[in-house]
C-alpha cells in the first residue's frame, strides 16, 4: 500500500487555517508542513495526517509502533516501508518448532493424544 504523496499536494480541509497537530498553534496552508505518521490508537494502528508548524513540533511527535515506518514521512512511491517480514517479526509471536518438540519430549507421558499425533508427523 502506498501513501499519498504530500510534497506538492497538501491535504486540504474546510476553512483557511489549520492547527499544528502538536502545539495547536493556528497556521495557514502555506505554513503547514504535512506528514503521515502511523500510531497506535487504543488497540488499532492508524495512519494519521499531521500538520506541523515547525521542526520542533515534528520532533515532538510520538514514535510509531514497531514494524511501521519509524518516522513522520511525506508518502509517495519512493518511501521505503518495512516489509511484511519486518512487520511480522515485530508484531507476531512465533514459536520455534524445536522448542515445541522439546517441550513435547519433556512431557511425553502427560500429553493428550492429539499432540502425540502431531509429534509423530514431525518425527518422519
Ligand atoms: Zn506546532
Image (cartoon, rainbow, N blue to C red):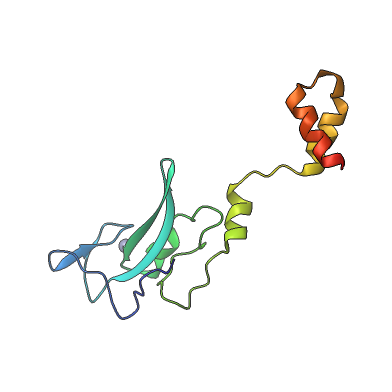
- Of 83 and 11, the residue lying toward us: 83
Question: Residue 74, located in which quarter of the rendered image?
Answer: bottom left
Q: Residue at x 68, y 44 (%)?
A: 94
Q: Is residue 66 visible?
A: yes
* Closer to us: 32 or 104: 104
Asked if 85 appears above or below 99 in the picture, the reply is below
Q: Quadrant of the C terminus?
A: top right
In the rendered image, the residue lying farthest to the top is 110
Image position of 1 (left or right of 28): right
Quarter of the view holding residue 110: top right
Q: Position of residue 82 (x, y in %)?
A: 56, 64
Q: Give residue 77's quadrant in the image.
A: bottom left
Residue located at (28% from left, 77% from top): 9
Give the percent coordinates (x, y) of residue 71.
48, 64
Image quadrant, ligand 1: bottom left
Q: Where is residue 80 shown, x and y percent of the image?
A: 53, 72
Amino acid at each position: 500500500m502506498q501513501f499519498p504523496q504530500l510534497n506538492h499536494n497538501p491535504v486540504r480541509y474546510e476553512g483557511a487555517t489549520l492547527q499544528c497537530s502538536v502545539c495547536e498553534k493556528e497556521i495557514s496552508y502555506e505554513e503547514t508542513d504535512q506528514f503521515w505518521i502511523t500510531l497506535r490508537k487504543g488497540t488499532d494502528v492508524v495512519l494519521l495526517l499531521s500538520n506541523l508548524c515547525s521542526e520542533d513540533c515534528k520532533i515532538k511527535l510520538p514514535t510509531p509502533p514497531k514494524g511501521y515506518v519509524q518516522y513522520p514521512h511525506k508518502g509517495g512511491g519512493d518511501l521505503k516501508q518495512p516489509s511484511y517480514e519486518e512487520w511480522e517479526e515485530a508484531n507476531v509471536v512465533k514459536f520455534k518448532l524445536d522448542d515445541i518438540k522439546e517441550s513435547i519430549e519433556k512431557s511425553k507421558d502427560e500429553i493428550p493424544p492429539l499432540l502425540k499425533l502431531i509429534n509423530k508427523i514431525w518425527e518422519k
